[in-house]
């Protein structure tokens, strides 16, 4: 085959780019991806589940199924990110003081780039999107999100970006430019390979998907609330979801613009961010962090909503200071757009500019402090149950304050000058994001799992997971504060000061404990699934919940509510349990319900997106063009679908709802003392 024909068909892709990597660790990871993919295909084929997967999941527009798929993506990518963290910590500990290398510097650069990219864009973002997707319509008394098809497209673009990231393990190499991809290092002159292109197109896909998702969440809250559900009657989780959605809509476009301009530099020889020809890399830094700091609050605000629900429920009290928490959430969302420049105090702007952004950074700590005090006061004199989600909440309160104080230190520009590129900064942002975001999402997963699947997670393994995650977090990141103050720099595969070595080994032990914590979550899921009959909670309210999602069976029907609820106060379900009988027979007629009809077009859009992005990465231009045209073609095809809804008969709704109400009335109301036993079938005894 001639070289010209080969390039037209395969672009820059060569046999040497496939599977075999520069060292045994990378090759093993590459082979593992292929083996796992083959195993999944074989399992689905052997069990005859392809049709089920397509009909029930990949073509579904049900917000609940889409939410679950987001969270599945998150857990899969979390496994990769934690494994990469383990390799990085092992490399740094082994190579300390001139010791043996486990991986080379080039591979280490790929590891810290993929670790950050995966954790931000493909673990935290899908997890929060999944939780909001599942819970938002249930909490506001709606049947679905406003735009179910757009919701499925957002999911498809997210998993397309995740697949592209996983493909980079097997085909070619990933970027070494860090999760922020700063030029000029990521320009062609310094990174001529495919790595940066993988980063650009994976982030581009998920960024567009997330923007669509944010629009959908905001419109749903504005337009789909049930009768009586005023904004100030919404659960706090809905308020955090609303502010997150607004941040998504306004913060993701700067990222899309920055990555697009970087792509133009690399593909068409533009000079937006090059050192010469009129380019200025500071334009990229400003664009990226105009997204990047609001992104921190996109990640953490939904977790704040989770903490509000968990602490209130397991304290047996109404949330203290609801209005102040709402105002604090809105203040954080607004102020998040005023602090981006503290990410580059060291890049040459004037002292006055640094002072202004440093002041804004300190200011954002005030509404955050309000939240912490409100959560503590919610617990005060409450009847606290130390469930696994509540244990994660207590860990969060302590460690988040410590991380916040380290952030206040770094808001001072001279202090930041000394520590900006050190491991102190790594300790700070992990101190915020792991307890604040990741622990929040794990707690939310444990808390709402019974609602989604109809059975509780095993409490014993939940507490084991909490112990391992907590011990691992402190062991992994507390030493980094000391190392940073001692002068240890981040993103270095080797250190030559022997004084660093003990701290690095402690951090390695912490990373191993975090990995064990993830394994404990997997074991918890397996054990719980095996014992799901004993852990079943079909009535739907195992924790004495307060919001409307607990006034549905577990799992909820496709239509969520047989009749849309009428709300007269905050915590409407808790009030109904105290003052009436929510499970009493319901008078009146039932009506037919229209729900969105399944469609495979979003999945096809995602597959076309993968083809387009892969073609762009490897300069396989025919594949990129076909994929791009196919994406838009499938989108246009949606406009020709005339049957986009289906009707669920009133008789079907009546039968399902009255069977659930009858079962709920016959169920025993379980007191808190035995809520973790088989006696709990989902009807918790409400507090007097």
Image (cartoon, helix red, strand yellow):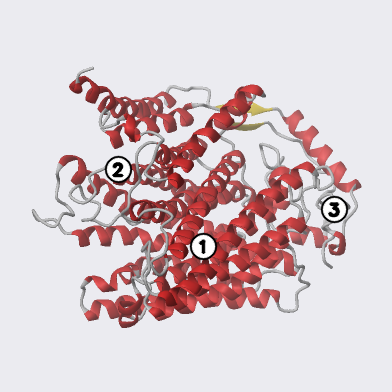
Could you give the CA–CA distance between mark 1 and mark 3, rounded to whole angstroms?
31 Å
- Give x and y (percent) for residue 19: 41, 35
- Give x and y (percent) for residue 289: 32, 61
Q: Which residue is mark 3?
A: 680
For residue 192, the mark is none
Q: Is residue 360 above or below residue 138?
A: below
Q: Which residue is mark 2?
A: 197
319 or 1: nearer the viewer: 1
Picture residue at 26% right of the left edge, 62% below the top:
286
Q: Alpha-carbon neighbours of circle 2 within 10 Å: few (<14), some, or many (≥20)? A: many
**Secondary structure found at label 3:** loop
Q: In the figure, residue 410 lies in which quadrant?
A: bottom left
Which of discs 2 and 1 lies nearer the camera? The answer is 2
State yes or no: discs 1 and 3 in contact (Cβ < 8 Å).
no
Could you give the CA–CA distance between mark 3 and mark 2, rounded to whole angstroms?
52 Å
The mark nearer the N terminus, 3 or 2, is: 2
Picture residue at 53% right of the left edge, 23% below the top:
643
Q: Alpha-carbon neighbours of circle 1 within 10 Å: few (<14), some, or many (≥20)? A: many
Q: Which residue is mark 1?
A: 301
Indicate the quadrant containing the C terminus: top left, top right, bottom left or bottom right. bottom right
Asked whether residue 101 appears in the rendered view, the answer is yes
**Secondary structure found at label 1:** helix
Asked whether residue 243 appears in the rendered view, the answer is no
Q: Is residue 466 above or below residue 564?
A: below
């Amino acid at each position: 085959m001639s070289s010209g024909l080969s390039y037209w068909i395969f672009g820059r892709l060569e046999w040497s780019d496939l599977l075999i990597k520069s060292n045994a660790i990378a090759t093993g990871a590459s082979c593992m991806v292929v083996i796992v993919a083959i195993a999944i295909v074989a399992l689905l084929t052997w069990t005859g589940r392809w049709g089920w997967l397509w009909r029930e999941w990949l073509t579904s527009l049900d917000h609940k199924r889409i939410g679950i798929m987001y969270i599945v993506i998150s857990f899969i990518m979390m496994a990769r990110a934690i494994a990469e963290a383990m390799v990085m910590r092992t490399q740094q500990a082994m190579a300390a003081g001139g010791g043996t290398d486990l991986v080379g510097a080039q591979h280490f650069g790929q590891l810290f780039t993929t670790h950050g990219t995966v954790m931000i864009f493909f673990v935290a973002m899908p997890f929060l999107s999944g939780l909001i997707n599942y819970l938002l319509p249930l909490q506001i008394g709606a049947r679905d999100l406003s735009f179910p098809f757009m919701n499925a497209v957002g999911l498809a673009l997210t998993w397309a970006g995740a697949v592209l990231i996983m493909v980079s393990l097997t085909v070619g190499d990933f970027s070494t430019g860090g999760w922020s991809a700063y030029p000029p290092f990521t320009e062609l002159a310094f990174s001529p390979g495919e790595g940066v292109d993988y980063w650009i197109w994976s982030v581009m896909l998920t960024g567009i998907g997330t923007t669509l998702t944010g629009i959908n969440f905001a419109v749903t809250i504005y337009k789909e609330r049930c009768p009586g559900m005023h904004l100030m009657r919404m659960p706090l989780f809905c308020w955090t979801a609303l502010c997150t959605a607004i941040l998504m809509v306004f913060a993701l476009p700067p990222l899309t613009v920055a990555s697009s301009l970087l792509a133009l530099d690399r593909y068409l020889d533009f000079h937006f961010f090059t050192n010469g020809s009129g380019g200025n890399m500071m334009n990229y830094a400003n664009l990226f962090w105009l997204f990047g700091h609001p992104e921190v609050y996109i990640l953490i605000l939904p977790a704040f909503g989770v903490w509000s629900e968990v602490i209130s429920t397991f304290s047996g009290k109404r949330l203290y200071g609801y209005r102040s928490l709402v105002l604090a959430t809105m203040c954080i969302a607004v102020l998040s757009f005023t602090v981006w420049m503290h990410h580059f105090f060291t890049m040459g702007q004037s002292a006055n500019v640094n002072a202004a952004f440093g002041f804004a950074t300190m200011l954002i700590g005030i509404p955050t402090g309000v939240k912490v005090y409100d959560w503590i006061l919610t617990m005060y004199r409450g009847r606290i149950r130390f469930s696994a989600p509540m244990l994660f909440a207590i860990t969060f309160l302590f460690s988040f304050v410590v991380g916040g104080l380290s952030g206040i230190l770094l808001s001072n520009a001279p202090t930041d000058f000394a520590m900006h590129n050190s491991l102190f900064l790594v300790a700070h942002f992990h101190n915020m994001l792991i307890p604040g975001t990741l622990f929040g999402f794990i707690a939310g997963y444990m808390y709402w799992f019974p609602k989604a699947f109809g059975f509780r997670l095993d409490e014993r393994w939940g507490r084991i997971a909490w112990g391992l995650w907590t011990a691992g977090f402190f062991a992994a990141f507390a030493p980094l504060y000391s190392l940073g103050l001692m002068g240890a720099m981040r993103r270095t595969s080797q250190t030559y000061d022997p004084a660093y070595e003990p701290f690095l080994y402690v951090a390695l032990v912490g990373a191993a404990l975090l990995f064990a914590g993830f394994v404990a979550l997997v074991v918890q899921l397996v054990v719980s699934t095996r014992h799901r009959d004993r852990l079943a909670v079909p009535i739907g309210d195992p924790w004495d919940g307060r919001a409307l999602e607990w006034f549905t069976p577990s799992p909820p029907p496709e239509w969520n509510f047989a009749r849309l609820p009428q709300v007269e106060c905050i915590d409407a379900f808790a009030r109904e349990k105290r003052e009436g009988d929510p499970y009493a027979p319901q008078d009146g007629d039932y009506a037919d319900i229209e729900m969105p009809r399944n469609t495979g077009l979003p999945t096809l859009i995602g597959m076309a997106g993968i083809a387009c992005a892969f073609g762009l990465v490897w300069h396989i231009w025919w594949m990129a063009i076909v994929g791009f045209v196919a994406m838009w073609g499938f989108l246009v095809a949606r406009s020709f679908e005339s049957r986009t809804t289906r009707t669920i008969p009133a008789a079907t709704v009546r039968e399902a709802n009255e069977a659930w109400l009858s079962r709920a009335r016959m169920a025993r109301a379980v007191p808190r003392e035995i809520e973790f036993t088989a006696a709990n079938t989902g009807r918790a005894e409400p507090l007097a």
